Amino acid sequence: MKRPEICVPIVAPFRSKIIEQAKEAAALPIQMAEWRMDFFSGYEIEITDIILDIKKYLADKKLIVTLRTEQEGGEPNGSRFDYFPLLTRIREQGAADYVDAEIMRDEKALRAVLSDTAQSTTKVIGSYHDFNGTPKQCFIVEMLERAGDMGCHVAKFACMPKTMEDVERLLRATEEEKERNPELPLITMSMGELGLCSRLYGGLYGSGVSFGSAFTASAPGQVSYKILNDVFDRIYSGRKHVILIGFMGTGKSTISRKLHELTGRPELDTDAWIEEQEGKKIAAIFEQEGESYFRQKETDMIDELGGMPPSIISCGGGMALRDLNVKKLQAIGEVVLLTAAPECILERVKESTARPILNGNMNREFIAGLMEKRQPYYERAADFCVATDGRSAREIAKEILEKTQYML
């Protein structure tokens, strides 16, 4: 998985301040800057000279120049500028690395920009922004496809969520388009406070750029570039952990201890970590805060795992049920699914009172039914599976080590 590039917006109204921000951006640990021309209070004739100045100070950092229209969330001030002729001049100049072009504004005019300046070194980002909501997944994919079909070099889609389901839909659409067209670079985001996870983790689904503020945010929900760097440092630090997943009672804690003995690597149990952080047992968390609260704690802690040295990590039985968890786990380690028959699991857990989901349901039928529901999620998450029925912990641990890069 490739670490997304971080882009900071330059949104100052005056030329002197624009250049000042460009100089400051050049010193930041980022890869790109975007000049939002619709914030500029000067004359259109100045724009190409300002682009040259910005690029000069940014040096090796990439520059996006954008004239966002009011219809797609831009400043009214930008309507003073002649949209497509300006895009054409910017491409002819070739100083900027990218120019943003709204694909639903005028298809014929955009195709002319793309064809008339086909040899330009300034590439085109074909964009679409919906500040009113989040469309259906098929529409998001269609717009990304449209940008690529028109000849744009990058496809961008941004929308405003009203629920977390909206955010998840945007991420699924990103993944779908990346699988369909892996060579087309994508930039996608769900805006506002709800959409934060798309800015932090969109790269796991195929988005190649995340916008973070260094001066003034250019869109709702932008966080500091520092936060993006911190999260990316953890999530994209390499697949260094051995991660055990599976239904409760499949032996994750036992096998984790044996792997620790054989390798000397630290071990961590995610349920125990959450209990320590919350100061209460899992059963109490479920009872007092609810399952959704606990599941969010699981999601949040994976970033912490990414910052740890190579370890053996034993996950709670429900960790792999959330798609974002799976993406994050796969980014930081090799995921091993431990399996066992329902009757074997019942025998192992029948005396336990620390498993809230089984309280009042300690029987083979319930365990088998719940396992059947969860199995597709587990299999989707795992790099490989290891059966634990009737085998010693050492035998299981050695098989895991033989199947991973962590050889004995």
Image (cartoon, rainbow, N blue to C red):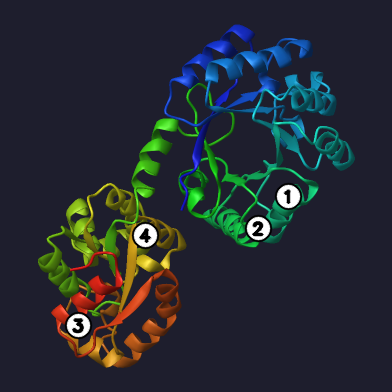
| Pointers 4 and 1 in contact (C-beta within 8 Å) | no
Give the numbered dot on residue 148: 1
Where in the figure is residue 358, as x and y percent of width and height?
A: 28, 79
Circle 3: element type: helix
- Looking at the picture, does residue 244 appear above or below residue 394? above
Give the numbered dot on residue 349: 3
Give the numbered dot on residue 175: none
Q: Quadrant of residue 100?
A: top right
Which residue, as the protein is rendered here, is positioned at the far front? Answer: 119
Count of labels in the image: 4
Give the Cα separation between the discs numbered 2 and 4: 24 Å
Give the Cα separation between the discs numbered 3 and 4: 26 Å
Residue with the mark numbered 4: 329
Sequence-wise, which precedes: disc 3 or disc 4? 4
Residue type, mark 1 in image:
Gly
Give the Cα separation between the discs numbered 4 and 1: 31 Å
Sequence-wise, which precedes: disc 4 or disc 1? 1
Circle 4: element type: helix
Which residue, as the protein is rendered here, is positioned at the far right? Answer: 108
Residue with the mark numbered 2: 181
The residue carrying pointer 1 sits among few (fewer than 14), some (14 to 19) or many (20 or more) residues within 10 Å by Cα, namely many
Give the Cα separation between the discs numbered 1 and 3: 53 Å
Q: Nearer the viewer, residue 189 or 178?
A: 178
Which circle, 3 or 4, is nearer the viewer?
Answer: 4
Give the Cα separation between the discs numbered 2 and 3: 46 Å
Give the Cα separation between the discs numbered 2 and 1: 9 Å
